[in-house]
Image (cartoon, rainbow, N blue to C red):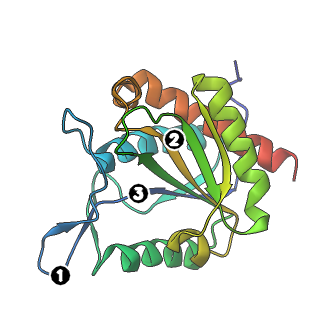
Amino acid sequence: SWPDDDLTLRGKKILIDPGHAAINPEGQPINLGQKTKRAEREYQINMAVAEKLNLELQRRGAKVLMTRTQADYWREGVSSPEDNKARAFLANDWGADIYLCLHSDWHPRKKFKGVTTYYYKNKSRRLGNLIQKNLIQTLGAHDRGLVKDSFTVLETVSMPAVLIEMGYLSHDEESKKLTTNSYQEKIAKAITRAVASYFSED
């Protein structure tokens, strides 16, 4: 339990990137991500968690910018890599203190499950470690670890940045959890706790 008047994150600039969902110049949707067998789409799940995370962070005093919102749901992008670069440039231009990219995983082998946090630059490792630890403790999910890997967005941003794979849409039980409000709330709270720890240890 965390007091509501705790403004640990006052003045911190946090960019949330709900992964996927862009429209190309011809007006066609691109970069949609994966889907569950019930046809729920990754870009929608990423957005639902991002909105909850936005509220949690703002309650702690943070300034939040989202790469897409309910009001501006579809970004414009020529291709997926170019769109991801543009998201990173937005964070750089705004001068974000940290960058949080939300995704949902998928694997053709349906038994794969769990949470993975990716980082690329060494200065992002501590943030990634705190987020992964908090998510595993809060969700009781399978721990797939903190992994160093290059994604366009993680290479391009200048601030500490992580890409969070919140669970597998290809895993029946986990995908059902990911579409529930309560589980999305848990994810948002766990990431917020990790971010608060990150800045308090600064």
Toward the front, the furthest residue is 109
x, y percentage for residue 112?
46, 36
Q: CA distance from mark 2 to mark 1?
A: 30 Å
Q: Secondary structure at mark 1?
A: loop
Can residue 145 be seen from the camera position used here? yes
| Residue 83 position within the rendered picture, expressed as x and y whole percent measured from the top left | 37, 75
Secondary structure category for the residue under label 3: loop
Q: Are marks 3 and 1 in contact (CB under 8 Å)?
A: no
* Whether residue 26 is situated above or below residue 35 in the rendered picture: below
Numbered label attached to residue 180: none
Which residue position is annotated with label 3? 19
Q: Residues within 10 Å of mark 2 (few under 14, many from 20)?
A: many
**Residue situated in front as seen by the camera: 76 or 80:** 80
Q: Which quadrant would residue 30 be assigned to in this image?
A: bottom left
Mark with earlier residue (3, 1): 3
Mark whose residue sits in front, 2 or 1:
1
Badge 1 is on which residue? 25
Question: Going 55% across and 49% down the picture, which residue do you hit?
Answer: 164
Looking at marks 3 and 2 on the same chain, the residue that comes earlier in the sequence is marked by 3
The residue at 58%/45% (across/down) is 116
Discs 2, 1 touching: Cβ within 8 Å: no
Q: Position of residue 77 (x, y in %)?
A: 29, 76
- The residue sitting at 70% across, 45% down in the picture is 195
Percent from the top left, x then y, of residue 92? 59, 77
Q: Are marks 3 and 2 in contact (CB under 8 Å)?
A: no
Residue wearing tag 2: 53
Earlier in the chain: of badge 2 and badge 1, it is: 1
Who is closer to the viewer here, 144 or 20?
144
